[in-house]
Image (cartoon, helix red, strand yellow):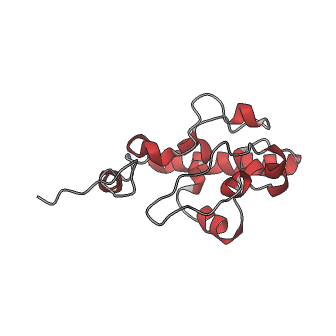
């Protein structure tokens, strides 16, 4: 019963906040900013170094605003998942009530929460986190899962 109540509060508050942010005409939430492609192009920070290559060679270049834009079919599909109601700050921390990029990404903001999978994902997905820790693609270098 308590879990259902907490889920209802998160979903209700999150929906209400997004609606208010969208109606106000300001980008005063993560979602309001990251769904506004024109705004992202105005406020992005250029890359300071080329992304590293991987097993398949050099990765294709994507502009910083293209990497963080939330839109299209994939975003609509994400909104239908159980992760969407949690809100951006559940995984990324930061400040979801600011229209200032520096303030929104301040404090304990996490650019790549998957690097903190044990803390950010482990509560709900302990088996996936445990398997990912020995994955070839986790962190730097190659890792193998022990089979003995």
Camera-side residue: 145 or 55?
55
Q: Residue at x 86, y 50 (%)?
A: 23
Name the spot of residue 123 as percent of width and height, x first: 38, 46
Judged from this view, the residue extending furthest toward the left is 148
Name above or below for residue 74 compared with residue 134.
below
Residue closer to the observer: 27 or 81: 27
Residue at 61%, 28% (x, y): give it: 107
Q: Which residue is depicted at the point 85% across and 55% down?
A: 38
Task: Tally the marks.
Answer: 0
> For residue 79, which quarter of the picture?
bottom right
Residue found farthest to the right? 25
Q: Is residue 144 above or below residue 140?
A: below
Give residue 138's position: percent from left, percent from top.
39, 52
Residue sitting at 57 percent across and 30 percent down?
Answer: 108
Q: Position of residue 76 (x, y in %)?
A: 66, 67
Q: Nearer the viewer, residue 145 or 84?
A: 145
Q: Quadrant of the C terminus?
A: bottom left
Could you say which is closer to the camera, residue 136 or residue 133?
A: 136
The image quadrant that residue 62 belongs to is bottom right
Left or right of 127 in this view: 95: right
Residue 122 percent location from the top left of the image: 37, 47
């Amino acid at each position: 019963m308590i879990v259902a109540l907490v889920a209802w509060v998160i979903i209700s508050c999150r929906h209400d906040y997004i609606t208010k942010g969208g109606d106000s005409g300001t980008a005063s939430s993560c979602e309001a900013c990251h769904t506004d492609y024109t705004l992202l192009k105005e406020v992005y920070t250029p890359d300071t170094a080329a992304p590293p290559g991987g097993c398949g060679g050099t990765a294709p270049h994507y502009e910083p605003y293209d990497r963080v834009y939330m839109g299209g079919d994939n975003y609509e599909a994400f909104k239908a998942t159980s992760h969407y109601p949690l809100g951006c700050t559940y995984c990324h921390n930061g400040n979801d009530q600011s229209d200032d990029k520096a303030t929104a990404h301040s404090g304990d903001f996490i650019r790549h929460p998957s690097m903190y999978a044990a803390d950010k994902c482990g509560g709900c997905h302990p088996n996936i986190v445990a398997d990912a820790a020995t994955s070839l693609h986790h962190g730097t270098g190659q890792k193998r899962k022990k089979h003995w």
